Image (spheres, rainbow, N blue to C red):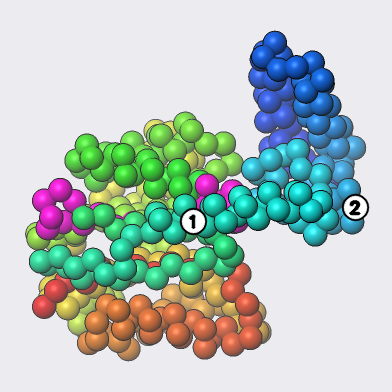
Amino acid sequence: MNAASAFASADDRFRPQLLERRARLQAASNSVSAAYFDDLIAEIDSALQRIDGGSFGLCETCHDTIEADRLECNPLVRFCLDHLSHAEMLAHQQDLDLATQIQSKLLPLRDIALESWDTQFRYVPVGAVGGDYCELIVLGDGKSIFFAVGDVAGKGVAASLLMTHLSAIFRSLLSLDLPLADLVARANRLFCESTAPSHYATLACGRATALGVELCNAGHCAPLLLQRDATHRLDSTGLPLGLFCGGQYGVRQLSLSAGESLVLYSDGITEAEDPAGDDYQEERLIRSLRAHYEQSADAMADGVLRDVVRFRQTSPPSDDMTLLIVRRRD
């Protein structure tokens, strides 16, 4: 991004946030001391001046770019992670540790097996926390399961907070026992109304019952239906969550025979790069899944992750990786 576009981005994205924060602070001025109020106003005005001067988002020590997820969380930050004070670094690490603990508690159980279904998931964040959403929830009848894989825009702590918010929305709505299309539409509206315009999430989700699977894909990577003699891509049936509050979502009905699987994944797998810069891609993912078709869902999931590591060789991961398998029991 060149300097002009970076300035425009800061002006469009952060100026309204800072002005709103300033207005709210002024409205609450009587509830804090005058000195504290003046310090906070000065911080906001300094950030606005940095936007005007084109230096917003640059570390005041090294002049390199400040981490995007930190600016999303707090547009008042002035230093990159390498140049925080000791007290600031300690506070940042405490926040990161807490975010990691919260996210780990939100992940589902590893081996959920029902009368008709086996499930497995693998969740590998690129850092201490990730922006992928992974969900497996046994529903009230004890025989059905809600499943989901999503990818929140952004990385790091800011993305993990949005993922936590998305998880809370779905866990609350599931208690209403809504039809899947209504569930996703209502989740989209809540997510859209409670996040910034720049925030969105792709999502593939569904319910597996004794009768089969219903699936909704909101702009996410195409889930894969693995049958004995064929593999089917299940393309999107709606826009990502958070783009338009009135979004509508279609639902597919799937019938799986014994041993067949539905596979959801994030693009951290298919866009993993080797040292030459080539992507892992969907075709290789399908080959890896089919190589373990006759084995368990557990073996299938581990086989994919091992293959991604072999493909990357010495290249470090650049994005979170999530894989979720829902397999019809024999």
| 73 left or right, relative to 243 | right
Residue 96 place in picture, x, y as percent: 60, 54
Residue 288 place in picture, x, y as percent: 38, 84
Q: Nearer the viewer, mark 2 or mark 1?
A: 1
| Extreme residue toward the top, this view | 30
In reply to whether residue 263 is colored magenta, the answer given is no
Q: Nearer the viewer, residue 56 or 275?
A: 56
Residue ID at (69%, 37%): 13
Disc 2: which residue: 61
Quadrant where the C terminus is found in the figure: bottom left
In reply to whether residue 160 is colored magenta, the answer given is yes
Residue 90 place in picture, x, y as percent: 70, 53
Disc 1: which residue: 101
Residue 78 visible in the snapshot: yes
Q: Residues within 10 Å of mark 1 (few under 14, many from 20)?
A: few
Residue ID at (57%, 36%): 196
Helix, strand or loop status at disc 2: loop
Quadrant where the N terminus is found in the figure: bottom right
Inspect the image, locate mark 1, and give the three-letter code of the amino acid beneath it: Gln
| 131 left or right, relative to 139 | right
Helix, strand or loop status at disc 1: helix
Q: Distance between the Cα atoms at labels 2 and 1?
A: 32 Å
Label 2–label 1 contact, CB within 8 A: no
Q: Which residues are magenta?
A: 139-161
